[in-house]
Image: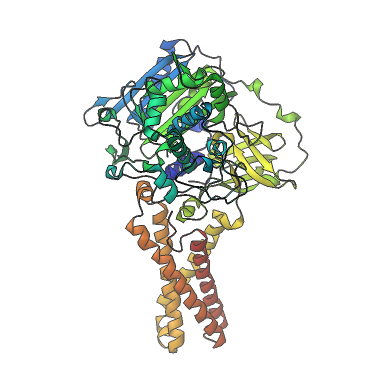
Amino acid sequence: MSSTIRKILGKMMLLVLLGVTLGTTGLGTIAPVSAAVSNLGLTSGKLEQGAAANLDDSDQLTAFMDGIMDMQMSSLQIPGAVISIVKDGKILLSEGYGHTNIAVNKPVDPNTSLFRIASTTKLFTWTAVMQLVEAGKLDLDTDVNTYLKTVQIPKTYEEPITLRHLMTHTAGFEEGGVGYQITTDPGKLPVSIAETMAKHMPARVKPPGEMLSYSNYGASLAGLIVEEVSGVAYNDYIQKNIFDPLDMNYATVEEPVPASLETYAVLGYTRANGEFVTKRPTYEGGFRPAGSGSVSANDMAHFMIAHLQDGRYEDKQMLKPETAKLMHSPAFQFDERLPAMDLGFYELNMNGLRVISHGGADELFNTALYLVPDKKVGIFVSYSGGEGGTAAEGLAQAFFDRYYPVHATEQPNKASIELGESLEKYAGSYQFTRRNHTKIDKFFSFLTQINVEVTDNRLSIGSGADQQVYTPIGVNLFQEVGGTHQMGFRTDAEGKVTYLFLDMLNPMPLEPAPLVNQSKFWLLLLGISVVLFITVLHGFVYRRREIKVMPKAQKWAVRLSAITSIWGLLTLGATLLVLNMDLIDRLSHIPLSLRLYLFMPVILVGLTASIFMMSVLAWKNQYWTLLKRVHYTFVMVAAVILSLFFYHWNLLGWHFG
């Protein structure tokens, strides 16, 4: 996966706490997973690789993982990490690295250290749903409103939303989170899931079942259904029906962690001035079914074993075999040739193996879980700070390269495939389906786009060293040159592209971005506007004497253009600050600075209306020379463009969720 895709994933996950991508989760060019791995001195994930190592050799496995972790923690500045690996119902490896608390030099213990797993928590929620399906209390294809007592989903579309839609992230909700997704104040806990779902219900923007769009709200809604149908509070249900039967004694979805486990909670760190600095933990509150989990590596090994052993852990049956198999089977497919979305798990293709997975990230922790059902193998890894997201990808790829290598002879014979058509229809800008449409959150997807270009009858993403090239291997299907990652497209009856799917980004497909949504379109217009505003200020400074002797009306017209230009530049500058504002501040509350900033576009619209009227007067009354009137009109148009920019991206007014 490229550096750009990692940035995109990182920002989206953190913004909505994707899975995000993703706890409960940037932009431009695209460096393969192999780049992240090779930067750490690990294997590349590229073809060709050597013979498979013996996974049952525990000494070799431990030495291999110790070497990777040592390298990652040093290179990526990671303060603490854990990993557990299981196979055939047994724990092969459970190790901790670094410290849970640097100040007191407390080492990570894989048996007891509680790492925040963010969106990986969703797997507990989905497992709970399947338990209730198994018990006959829920049906995957029944309208969720049938089960909801305190909240009702509006009937925006004819098709109702079902649990299958929630579990496959195809309910069609927009994404959101600004101001309410998390909290840093434990005094505000606990928060009612029902109240949160009612207060922060997102718009339905696609018919259910049409396309993937990763949703923290959807997962939280499923948690509410578990709560209301079972008659047991969500936290208690997970504890009694998943953690207790699986002997997960160091696991909780409570926030903050209960007093009995508080001493085991791992501190999250960021880097400042070359040192690790602790930050306040974040809490999911009413969104806890989507990301509130704190778990030890050893306990997650128990959870992985249960899923890999057809729902069984030792003598406990978490799910019936048929239920576990159903949960691990494709439930939504973008294309049958590409990794599917299962019931809660998303599929990946790792060196030709079908892997079911889930990740999670917040600003302080990064987690990933990989299960290989056919091999009965599972990997759980979590990092506390640093570049843990990159590290998880690198570690997983290195593991599969060593124990399940892929060889060049396994590549499709691309030369034998003739599509007989131009690839130009695939070129263009694409935006993620997981984005906001109606609130201020929309603005934060301004730069999260991917550009696809055609080069030598191949598709490319990015440029230079970061370029990723895909060659056609079938209709609407492409494979990475020298690698195993694939990219697919959906087209309509007329052959027009409707969606783009990158297997490494499952479950976050993209769709063609209309011109009005393309960042490059707006950046061009904004750049021209900035130049025009600067010319106004330049003229205002160097033509002071000429302006002084102008008639009063003309003088005020010039002053208005200068004021509008200054205000436009200031508003754009402030917008850049908003785009880069502290993520935790953005998601936990609406900062006063953001509320005050939103007055700026409103004032700009007022100035734009004024300069528009003044422009009409300038032409009517023949102010200045023709050239100067044309310039004045262009400045007015620049102000209109700026106002339209703020309107389009929901920055005109206070559009909070």
Give the farthest residue toward the left: 104
User: Residue 455: which quarter of the image?
Assistant: top right
Query: Is residue 130 positioned above or below 305 on the image?
Result: below
**Image quarter of residue 339:** top right
Which residue is at 46% across, 27% downward?
Answer: 369
**Rendering coords of residue 73 (x, y %):** 36, 28
Nearer to the camera, 472 or 349: 349
Horizontal relation, residue 105 to residue 222: left or right? left
Q: How many marks?
A: 0
Residue 635 appears anywhere in the view:
yes
The reply, left or right, for residue 603 in relation to residue 345 is left
In the rendered image, residue 97, in percent from the top left (x then y), is placed at: 33, 24
On screen, residue 158 above or below 606: above
x and y percentages locating residue 206 in the rendered image: 59, 48
In the foreground, 539 or 607: 607
| Residue at point 76%, 37% (across, down) | 419
**How far across and how far down the image is residue 648, in percent?**
52, 60
Q: Can residue 68 be seen in this view?
A: no
How was this image coloured?
Answer: rainbow
- Residue sticking out furthest to the right: 420
Report the front residue among 152 and 481.
Answer: 152
In the displayed structure, would residue 528 be above or below residue 615?
A: above
